[in-house]
Amino acid sequence: MAPSFGMFSRAPRKSPAERTVTLIGKPGCHLCDDAQAVIERICAETGASWEKKDITEDAELHRTYWEQIPVILVDGAQHDFWRVDPKRLRGALGA
């Protein structure tokens, strides 16, 4: 049995295939299109899944993120906004 280190113990790390990237944007946004291209490529490379949400169809997303789009979430937590750094996204996915 492995020793336990109390507050320093970690839950097992998720594999990239268990992660989900969410792109929050809107139609006609060139930064959103650029972000989507990076997300599609990195998710294809790592096996992570991704989804796209439109702030024009969700009042809460619009209220929360309208000044930051595109916004990128990893497993529901905000990861980035405006631009996606491929290396940083790979790292967040554990790849």
Image: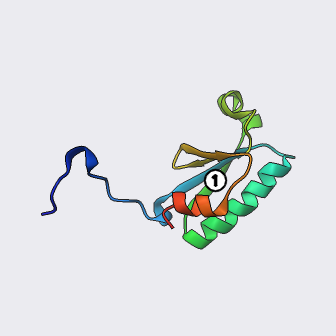
Instruction: Please tell me whether residue 26 is drawn above or below residue 62 in the rendered image.
Output: below
- Taking the spot 25% from the left edge, 44% from the top edge, the residue there is 7
| Residue 8 screen position, x and y as percent | 27, 48
Farthest residue to the left: give it.
Answer: 1
Q: Who's the residue at 67% across and 33% down the image?
A: 61
- Say which residue appears at 12% left-offset and 63% top-offset: 1
- Which quarter of the picture shows residue 37? bottom right
Residue 68 located left or right of residue 42 = right
Q: Residue at position x 77%, y 35% from top?
A: 56
Give percent across and percent down for residue 51: 64, 53
Measured as percent of width and height from the top left, residue 63 is found at 69, 27
For the residue marked with disc 1, what is the amino acid? Answer: Glu
The way the protein has been coloured in the rendering is: rainbow
Q: Which residue is mark 1?
A: 51
| Horizontal and vertical percent position of residue 62 | 71, 31
The residue closer to the viewer here, 69 or 87, is 87
In the picture provided, is 18 more to the left or to the right than 81?
left
Outermost residue to the bottom: 45
